Image (cartoon, rainbow, N blue to C red):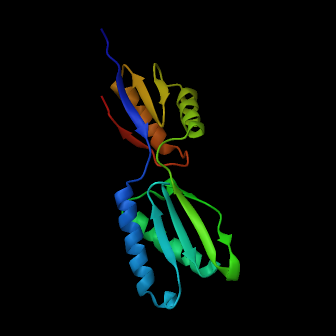
Amino acid sequence: MATNSSFDVTTGVDLQEVDNAVNQATKEIQQRYDFKGTKCTIDLDKKENAIKLDADDEYRLKAVLQVLREKLSKRGVSLKNLDEGEAEIGTLGRARQRLGLKQGIDQETAKKIVKAVKDQGFKKVQVQIQGEELRATCPSKDTLQDVMVFLRSQDFGVELKFGNYR
C-alpha cells in the first residue's frame, strides 16, 4: 500500500521579532538628529496584528517607515507580509499609517496557489485549502520537492513557509 507524502504551506510573521524591530526603530527615532523635537511614534497592536505609525508630517512618516522596514528586514521578518495602508494626513499636517501583519494565507491567495500548481501539471499532486494554510499531498517525495521549488519561484504577494514535511 502506497502512502502519500505531504507538506504544509503557511505564511506569517514572528510577532516577537516584530516587537523587537519596533523597539529598535523607536530607539533609533528617539536618537536621530532629524527627529529631535518631534512626536513620531511606532505602536505594535498584537491583538489586531498591526503596526501604527504616527508622525508630524508626511516626510517624517516616510522616514519612520523606512527605519521600521530596515529593522524588520534585519530581524528576518519578510516585508512581503506587511500590508501597508494608505497614509492619512490629519489636522495640522500630522500623518498616520497602519501596517497590517499577514498571519495566514487568505482565500484568494490560496486559490491562486492551488491553480498555479494544477496549471503546472505535476502528476498526482493534490493541494487542499485547510483554513489559513495549504496541504500538498503526493505519493512521490521528489514531486513534492519539485512543487516546493516551483512555489518558491513564484510571487504570490506573501512569503511562503513550508513545514510538516512527511
Viewer-nearest residue: 165 or 44: 44
Compared to 21, does 102 lie above or below?
A: above
How far from the left and from the top, in percent, is residue 126? 47, 23
Compared to 114, does 159 lie above or below?
A: below
Q: Residue at x 42, y 33 (%)?
A: 146
Give the quarter of the figure containing the N terminus.
top left
Q: Residue at x 36, y 27 (%)?
A: 6
Viewer-nearest residue: 94 or 72: 94
Give the quarter of the figure containing the C terminus.
top left
Compared to 98, does 155 lie above or below?
A: above
Callout count: 0
In this view, which residue lies farthest toward the top?
A: 1
Q: Residue at x 41, y 86 (%)?
A: 31
Q: Quadrant of residue 114?
A: top right
Q: Quadrant of residue 135?
A: top left
Q: Quadrant of residue 19?
A: bottom left
How far from the left and from the top, in percent, is residue 68? 47, 70
**Relative to 18, is 90 on the left or the right?**
right
**Relative to 110, is 124 on the left or the right?**
left
Compared to 160, does 30 lie above or below?
A: below
Viewer-nearest residue: 24 or 128: 24
How far from the left and from the top, in percent, is residue 46? 44, 57
How far from the left and from the top, in percent, is residue 82? 52, 57
**Relative to 103, is 95 on the left or the right?**
right
Q: Residue at x 55, y 40 (%)?
A: 106
